[in-house]
Image: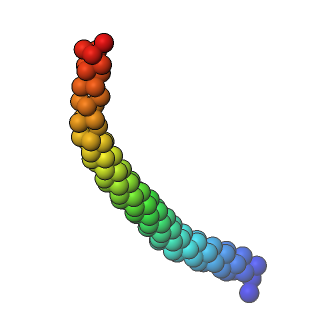
Amino acid sequence: MSRPMLLVFLLLVLIITSQFEWKQQLVIDLDSTPSISQKQHQISKREEVVKEKIILSQEKSIQRLNELVRSLREQLQQCRDNNETTNDNASPLSEHVIELERQQILGN
């Protein structure tokens, strides 16, 4: 083989191998794009799961607070009922004390 023919042959081999390497790199880049998309999708799913957990936690807290409010209302009603009962019992006693004081004033 003559020297120019050898150089042309080497040049062709170089061009072909470089094209092959470029194509291979493009394929790798294309393959990595879905990987990035998959990662974003996974991140998005994780965020959704975290949001759902937060919402569930808040719903449980709201439910506990509602139960506490209900319990406090029942206690308040019991206190009111006890207070009314005490006032009802105290009324005749108060009237009796007032009557005794009136008698003392009139008697003196």
Q: Give the residue furthest to the right.
A: 3
Residue 101 location, x and y as percent?
29, 21
Q: Give the residue furthest to the front.
A: 107
Question: Which residue is found at the position 30% from the left and 42% from the top?
Answer: 86
Residue 36 location, x and y as percent?
51, 66
Question: Which residue is found at the position 51% from the left and 68% from the top?
Answer: 39
Question: Which residue is found at the position 67% from the left and 75% from the top?
Answer: 14
Residue 63 location, x and y as percent?
35, 59
Viewport quadrant of the N terminus = bottom right
Residue sitting nearer the eye, 86 or 2? 86
The colour mode here is: rainbow
**Residue 90: which quarter of the image?**
top left
**Residue 61: which quarter of the image?**
bottom left
Residue 49 falls left or right of residue 19: left
Evaluate whether residue 26 shows in this view. Answer: no
Residue 61 falls left or right of residue 85: right
Residue 22 location, x and y as percent?
58, 71
Q: Where is 108 relative to 82, above or below?
A: above
Q: Where is 51 relative to 30, above or below?
A: above
Viewport quadrant of the C terminus = top left
Residue sitting nearer the eye, 45 or 22? 45
Residue sitting nearer the eye, 65 or 84? 84
Evaluate whether residue 10 shows in this view. Answer: yes
* Tally of numbered discs: 0
Residue 85 falls left or right of residue 39: left
Question: Which residue is found at the position 38% from the left and 54% from the top?
Answer: 68
Residue sitting nearer the eye, 8 or 24? 24
